[in-house]
Image: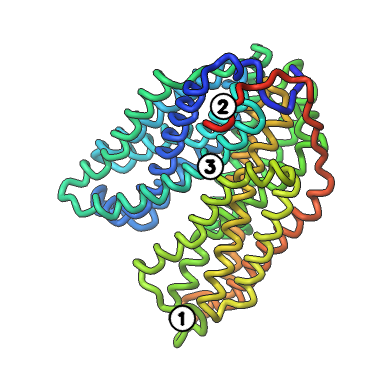
């Protein structure tokens, strides 16, 4: 493996005109905007999908589950293949796969066929790791940080645009036309990645650890399946225990194999070093607070205070506006993290992000009787999450060897997703344990417990952070043209 000069690949960057670099980042921003669009577009259409395919409320949950399982299996494998064969090459293949999947969803006469389309959409989650690898390979440290922040912000902005667009298109008479809207966006993505996106410059050992890849895929599939079952039947059910136990067994065998493989699928000695493992722990925590609580706040705010003793009886229209209260601060802070990191360093950015997340979650737990206090807590927490979402992939891509950037950032994405899945299952069980039988809803104590767990997770991240050791940036690098940093 090649050593990692913490400043990215300045030699490659210095040979490109500034306009070309700006164009590269611009097209990648469009790809991530499209990724966010797809993630935000489908959720508001679930009611229409139930009617379109004549399915039940329980069955529609598989629309999300199928894509999540496919993403959990494909992200580590595809990000590693990007390190071996080229990140642009794999990005092209995955964009085509997602486009085919979205087309299949739109044109499917039956729900099972639509689920096959959602499985083909699973590689959507690997776009960001592949793009980060391309950016880190082609740009300097400062430029790549700015680009990563903008990529993360583009996902959030795309999700907002997708959700709003679904609100307008859902009124169309032909539901197939409604579902074809994302296909148009994806066709533009195919043009972008084939015409305007360059290839990364580093390659890993071309030998493929087939058994290692297979073991990792089976582990992720079993674990995510078990967590999905836990969210419905609890952790004590046989349907939950069997896949989770199976996942543990597969993981132990996989670790044994990887430690003996000549060229392992994932270099365990790399990710267990002090410069990376704390970042991965914090990545899991980000998933807990950012993904695991997505429905918690909505059900709390929708609660009738006269009947349940909490909530604000908010209709769906107001709930969508409240969700933007945390989304936009996160988007802004993810863009701004590079400037903050330039002055304070990445570790202090993580410190600020975790502290803001802790304060926001504590605010939700303690001041939940005031809507104003909740909004302030959401803004503070959103700012913290945005800093973490920008800084973590930047730090990981800088600390990993250049020929392992794809798999290093792919693991970040997988752990973030896993954190959300674990939290979603655990939080569902917490609320169920606090349920009020006469109302069929959780009591205030359940929600407070969830927010305290999130605050405690941030506290764990703060305790882990001091163990993170960064490489010192090398000073003997070829400098970029002076106007390049300004344009990017």
On the image, the x and y values in percent for residue 81 come to: 58, 21
Q: Name the quarter where the N terminus is drawn.
A: top right
Q: Earlier in the sequence, mark 2 or mark 3?
A: 3
Whether residue 139 is visible here, answered yes or no, is yes
Please state which of residues 441 and 85 is positioned toward the viewer in this rendering: 85
Q: Foreground mark, 1 or 2? A: 2
The residue at which mark 2 appears reads as 483
SS at mark 3? helix
Q: Residue at x 72, y 62 (%)?
A: 456
Q: How packed is label 1: few (under 14 Cα within 10 Å), some, or many (20 or more)?
A: few
Q: How packed is label 3: few (under 14 Cα within 10 Å), some, or many (20 or more)?
A: many
The residue at which mark 3 appears reads as 152
On the image, the x and y values in percent for residue 344 come to: 74, 46
Q: Earlier in the sequence, mark 1 or mark 2?
A: 1
Above or below, comparing residue 128 to residue 46 in the picture: above
Q: CA distance from mark 1 to mark 2?
A: 63 Å
SS at mark 1? loop
Q: Residue at x 40, y 62 (%)?
A: 320
The residue at which mark 1 appears reads as 439
SS at mark 2? helix
Please state which of residues 223 and 37 is positioned toward the viewer in this rendering: 37
Q: Would you say 232 lies left or right of 117 here?
A: right
């Amino acid at each position: 493996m090649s050593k990692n000069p913490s400043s990215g690949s300045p030699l490659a960057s210095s040979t490109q005109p500034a306009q070309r670099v700006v164009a590269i980042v611009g097209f990648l921003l469009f790809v991530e905007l499209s990724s966010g669009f797809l993630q935000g577009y489908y959720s508001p259409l679930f009611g229409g999908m139930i009617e379109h395919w004549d399915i039940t409320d329980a069955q529609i949950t598989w629309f999300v589950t199928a894509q999540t399982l496919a993403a959990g299996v494909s992200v580590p494998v595809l990000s590693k293949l990007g390190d071996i064969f080229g990140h642009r090459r794999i990005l092209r293949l995955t964009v085509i796969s997602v486009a085919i999947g979205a087309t299949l969803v739109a044109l499917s006469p039956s729900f099972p066929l639509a689920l096959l389309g959602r499985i083909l959409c699973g590689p959507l989650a690997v776009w960001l790791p592949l793009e980060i690898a391309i950016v880190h390979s082609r740009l300097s440290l400062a430029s790549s940080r700015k680009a990563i922040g903008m990529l993360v912000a583009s996902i959030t902005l795309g999700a907002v645009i997708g959700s709003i667009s679904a609100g307008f298109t859902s009124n169309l008479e032909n539901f197939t036309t409604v579902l074809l809207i994302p296909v148009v966006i994806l066709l533009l993505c195919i043009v972008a990645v084939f015409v305007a996106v360059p290839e990364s410059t580093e390659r890993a050992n071309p030998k493929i650890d087939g058994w290692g890849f297979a073991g990792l895929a089976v582990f992720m599939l079993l674990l995510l399946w078990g967590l999905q079952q836990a969210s419905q039947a609890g952790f004590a059910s046989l349907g939950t225990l069997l896949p989770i136990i199976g996942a543990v067994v597969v993981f132990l065998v996989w670790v044994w194999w990887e430690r003996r493989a000549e060229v392992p699928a994932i270099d365990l000695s790399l990710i267990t070093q002090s410069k990376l493992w704390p970042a991965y722990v914090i990545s899991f925590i980000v998933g807990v607070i950012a993904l695991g609580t997505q429905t918690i706040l909505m059900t709390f705010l929708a609660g009738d205070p006269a009947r349940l003793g909490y909530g604000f009886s908010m209709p769906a229209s107001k709930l969508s506006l409240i969700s933007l209260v945390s989304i936009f601060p996160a988007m802004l802070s993810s863009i701004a993290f590079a400037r903050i990191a330039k002055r304070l360093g990445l570790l202090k950015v993580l410190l600020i992000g975790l502290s803001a997340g802790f304060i926001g979650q504590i605010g939700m737990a303690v001041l939940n009787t005031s809507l104003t206090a909740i909004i302030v807590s959401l803004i503070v927490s959103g700012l913290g999450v945005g800093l973490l979402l920008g800084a973590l992939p930047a730090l990981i891509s800088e600390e990993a060897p250049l020929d392992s950037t794809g798999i290093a950032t792919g693991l970040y994405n997988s752990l973030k997703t896993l954190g959300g899945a674990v939290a979603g299952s655990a939080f569902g069980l917490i609320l169920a344990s606090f349920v009020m039988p006469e109302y069929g809803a959780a009591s205030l104590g359940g929600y407070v417990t969830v927010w305290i767990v999130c605050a405690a997770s941030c506290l764990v991240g703060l305790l882990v952070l001091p163990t993170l050791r960064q490489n010192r940036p090398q000073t003997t690098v070829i400098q970029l043209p002076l106007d390049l940093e300004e344009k990017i």
